[in-house]
Structure formats: structure tokens, C-alpha cells
Amino acid sequence: MATDNAASRLRELLARAKAIDRNTASVNAWEQLLQTKKNPALLLSRLGKVIALPENIAATLSNSVDTAPGVVSHISSQFYAAFSAHKFGEKWEVFITRIDEHMMNYLALASTLLETQIKTKRLEESEIEELRKSFVELLDQVRASDLPPRLKSYVVLQLHDLISSLDDYFITGAEPILERIEATIGHAYTDPEYKGFLKDHELGKSLLDCLGAAANLVTVAVGIPQLTQLILQLQQGG
């Protein structure tokens, strides 16, 4: 079973990075690697999330007695050193040669150690794309609806954030998706108008259906089944 943790995601990204033509301009290599399609804002946003991965690895491994000395420090120090000297205008070769095989091996070790602490399953691209499609279709419907402005604005924002978290899955994993689902559901317990929308409006029911499908998939991936119970309560009028 393919696993999903920060170390495995970073190692996979760097393996793909090493396969890019070394004569490519760095900015173009990052656009290719992070799938940003000539969007500078998206590029910088995703690059920031990549840079945060060593800290995520360190935070998760901090309580592990099995962590080999130097694993986390080598990953962090080499990765940050590579970025601190990095320039978008230079050839990709200059950046990627700063990532040595020791770091790749340490990432493999860190991934194994993380897997002993957090049992996770890698979601398939087709699964992510199916969820994304359903949320995009719903977003279009909400934008075209006559919902009250405040409610409409909130729902549009939540759907946009859910779609973004799905788009970033290959970098950030399932946890941000789970957090967005939790926030979108949890708001119903502090906002009566929104709760009524979820229970009584066709678009609200569709949103709950989409959230339920996402929760069923993501909670299996991260091993937290309780979230689907909250959605079921709302669907049943709770």
C-alpha cells in the first residue's frame, strides 16, 4: 500500500525534480514540477508548501525514539541551504546538484519511521480528480444561485479552499483536505442560517453529499472515521 506522509511526498517530488532536464531554467523546472502553468502566485504558494515539508517531517518525528541521529537535521539543513542559495534564473542543475543521495536516503528512512507512527494511505490521482470535479460543479451552481449574499460568499469561499486543498494534495497530503472538510461541516454548529442551508436547500444537500464522499475517502486515508458521522447527523436533521 502506498503511504502518504511528508517525507514520502518530499522524496517523490525530489525524485521527479532530478528527472527534469538539468539545462532547464529553474523557474521553468519549478513550474513543471509544481504544475503551476505560468501562474507566479500559485508557483510561490506551492513552493512555500514544499519548503515547509522538512519542518512537518521534524514535527512528526520529534517524539519518535527510533529516529536515527542526524536524519532530521541533515534533511532540513541541506534542503534549506539549497533554497537559500537558489535563483530562479539559474540552470536547474545548480539547484538539483545540492540535493545529494544522503538526503534521498534519509528521506526514505524518515518516511519509514513516519509510517510506524501514522498509518496513512496514498490517494489515487483519479480519486482526487473525481472529488475535485464534483466540488467544481457545485461551485459553479452556487455562484449562479440566488442564495443570500453572506451565505453565498461563505459557501463559495469554502468550496474554493476545498478545491485548492485537493489541487495541492501531491505536496501537502490529506490533512489540509480533512481540515477544510471539518471547518465546512463545523461551521453549521455556529451559524443557524448555514445549518439550515445544509439541511433544507438542494445546494446544501449537494454540498453535504460532496463532503460525505470526500470524508469517506480522506478519513480512510488518514485513519479518522469519526468525521463521516457528523455529516450523517446533519443529513438526518441533527
Image: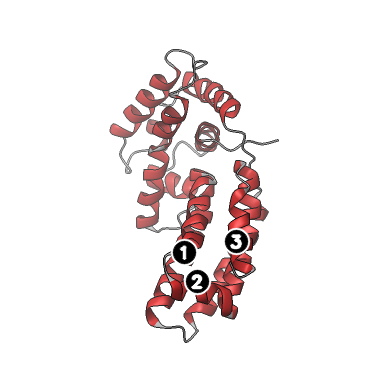
Measure the alpha-carbon separation of dots 1 and 3.
12 Å
Q: Position of residue 103 (x, y in %)?
A: 47, 22
In the rendered structure, which amino acid carries the disc numbered 3? Ile
Q: Mark 2 points at which residue?
A: 195
Measure the alpha-carbon separation of dots 2 and 3.
11 Å
Name which residue lies at 48% across and 60% down: 186
Name which residue lies at 65% across and 60% down: 213
Confirm or deny contact between disc 2 and disc 1 (CB under 8 A): yes
Q: Which of 124 and 80 is in front in this view?
A: 124
Specify the quadrant that holds the N terminus: top right
Q: How crowded is mark 1: few (under 14 residues within 10 Å), some or many (20 or more)?
A: few
Q: Name the residue under label 1.
A: 189
Task: Please tell me whether residue 132 is drawn above or below residue 96 in the rendered image.
Answer: below
Q: Is mark 2 on a helix, strand or loop?
A: helix
Q: Mark 3 points at which residue?
A: 231
In the rendered structure, which amino acid carries the disc numbered 1? Tyr
Q: In which image quadrant can residue 231 be found?
A: bottom right
Q: Earlier in the sequence, mark 2 or mark 1?
A: 1
Task: Please tell me whether residue 110 is drawn above or below residue 145 in the rendered image.
Answer: above
Q: Which of marks 2 and 3 is nearer the N terminus?
A: 2
Q: Which of 138 and 87 is in front in this view?
A: 138
Q: What residue occupies the far front of the structure in this picture?
A: 238
Nearer the camera: disc 1 or disc 3: 1
Q: Which of 198 and 169 is in front in this view?
A: 198
In the rendered structure, which amino acid carries the disc numbered 2? Lys
